[in-house]
Image: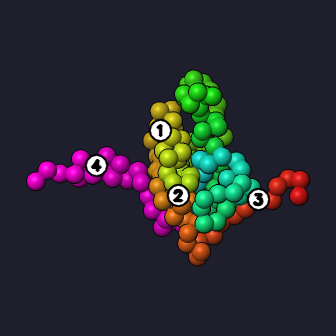
Amino acid sequence: DAADPAAPAAGWPAEQRGTLVDKSEVLDVMNGSRPDRVLVCALGEDAFHGWAPTRYTRRGHIPTSLNLPAKDRLLDSRGRFLSRPELEEAVSALPADTGTLLYCGGGISATLLGFVLVLLGRDDVTVYDGSIEEWSADPSLPMTRTPPANS
């Protein structure tokens, strides 16, 4: 009886390191009970602020989140990573003295940003892989939208 090749092996490194978190940990950070962590949304600016139509149940971002659009700030026009100095500059606005809890729409852009942070030497990086897909579907969870500057 062969194991399912698509299933992660027991003790998968992400599980061992506690790299993936659920919405209860996001709530802890958002509510201030985890001041050792900062929430960072890796979606593009229009999606983060709730300006663009989206496939998610609600628009916007998790309150208290910072925004660092992974695809826009970490990749060149051909989808390749920028140089190390450019990556360092791109993430320089993120606090270096706290852990970073990343999310996006469904976990992909967050893991892209997480990869870069680890590559640059940060070791306290986690990903909420349920991301806005899960968060926005629960009407009891708060979301924030930012009015456009010209409104």
**Mark 2 and mark 4 in contact (Cβ < 8 Å)?**
no
Whether residue 99 appears in this view of the structure is no
Residue identified by numbered label 2: 131
Label 2 CA crowd tier, 10 Å (few <14, some 14–19, many 20+): many
Whichever of labels 4 and 1 marks the residue nearer the N terminus, that label is: 4
| Residue 131 x %, y % | 52, 58
Q: Residue at x 27, y 52 (%)?
A: 7
Query: How far apart are the two marked residues, 4 and 1, measured between alpha carbons?
Result: 22 Å
Local SS, label 4: loop
The residues bearing labels 2 and 1 have C-alpha atoms spaced at a distance of 17 Å
Whether 148 is drawn above or below 143: the answer is above
Q: Earlier in the sequence, mark 2 or mark 3?
A: 2
Residue 45, visible in the rendered structure: yes
Residue that badge 1 annotates: 115
Report if residue 145 lies within the magenta region.
Answer: no
Whole-number angstrom distance, CA of label 3 to CA of label 4: 40 Å
- In magenta, the rendered stretch is 1-28
Q: Residues within 10 Å of mark 1 (few under 14, many from 20)?
A: few
Q: Residues within 10 Å of mark 4 (few under 14, many from 20)?
A: few
State which quadrant residue 49 falls in. bottom right
Question: How far apart in space, not on screen, are marks 1 and 3 (Cα)?
Answer: 28 Å
Residue at (64%, 36%) from the top-left corner?
73
- The amino acid on which the numbered mark 4 sits, given as a three-letter code, is Ala
User: Disc 2 and disc 3: Cα gap in Å?
Assistant: 19 Å
Q: Residue at x 44, y 58 (%)?
A: 21
